[in-house]
Amino acid sequence: MSSQLEAIETNDVALQPGRIAPPGQYLTFVLGGEAFALGILHIKEIIEYGDITEVPMMPEFIRGVINLRGRVVPVVDLAARFGRGTTTVAKRTGIVIVETVSSHDGDGDDKQQDIGIIVDAVNEVVDIGSKDIEPAPAFGARIRPDFINGMAKQNGRFIILLNVDRVLSVTEMANLSKAVVDDYQSSEGYE
């Protein structure tokens, strides 16, 4: 991986002090045998894994795009985004359509962007109270610390509460895509 890609991936990694996921409803899902959750307010819909059109020269974690009722929606493989290799498609594999907000266009206006995320299986929507949420661990997690908003205790198990704005940062993904193109062009002798 180039130093440019490494710089982008580790940029602004620290969480804001005291930041923790709020209580509320969360959609839980499984990825690589671990339980994760996203706030239900970010979820637009859940669809079956289907035809994904690959887009050349994208980072490994961007699997491609899908046509969702006439709209082009990029699809991110969360396992690959977390550096765990690509998701193996199985019977319960699904795509969760998540609504994110981006201001990467430079005009100061926030834009909504739908992004699909590939998960091994969707579980359920759960209510998580503030007493059940603990801060993200400072070490030991197998994903970047800024991707985690907290750890929820449910039925004797921990659920990793994801920070959707960091995991699906349109700005960061655009910068990573540009870095992939730049690396390709420099290796091929383009100026």
Image (tube, rainbow, N blue to C red):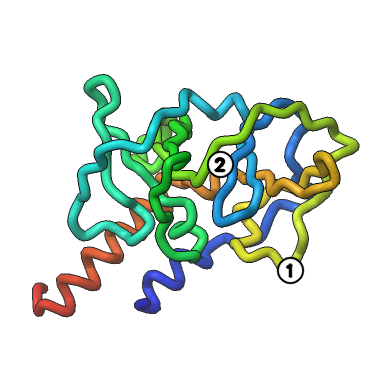
**Outermost residue, right side:** 131
Q: Secondary structure at mark 2?
A: helix
* Left or right side of 57 for 24: right
- On the image, the x and y values in percent for residue 80 come to 44, 59
* Left or right side of 161 for 133: right
Q: Determine which of the numbered discs, if any, sits on residue 139 in the image.
A: 1
Dot 2 crowding, Cα within 10 Å, few <14, some 14–19, many 20+: some
Dot 1 crowding, Cα within 10 Å, few <14, some 14–19, many 20+: few
Q: Determine which of the numbered discs, if any, sits on residue 164 in the image.
A: 2
Q: Nearer the viewer, residue 31 or 57?
A: 31
* Left or right side of 35 for 158: right
Seen at 39% across and 49% down, the residue is 89
Quarter of the figure with the C terminus: bottom left
Which amino acid, by three-letter code, is at mark 1? Phe
Q: Nearer the viewer, residue 154 or 62?
A: 154
- On the image, the x and y values in percent for residue 31 come to 55, 51
* Image vertical order of residue 129 relative to residue 188, above or below: above
Seen at 15% across and 71% down, the residue is 185
Q: Which circle's residue, 1 or 2, is located before the other in the chain?
A: 1
Give the number of marks: 2
* Image vertical order of residue 117 relative to residue 113, above or below: below
Seen at 76% across and 44% down, the residue is 20
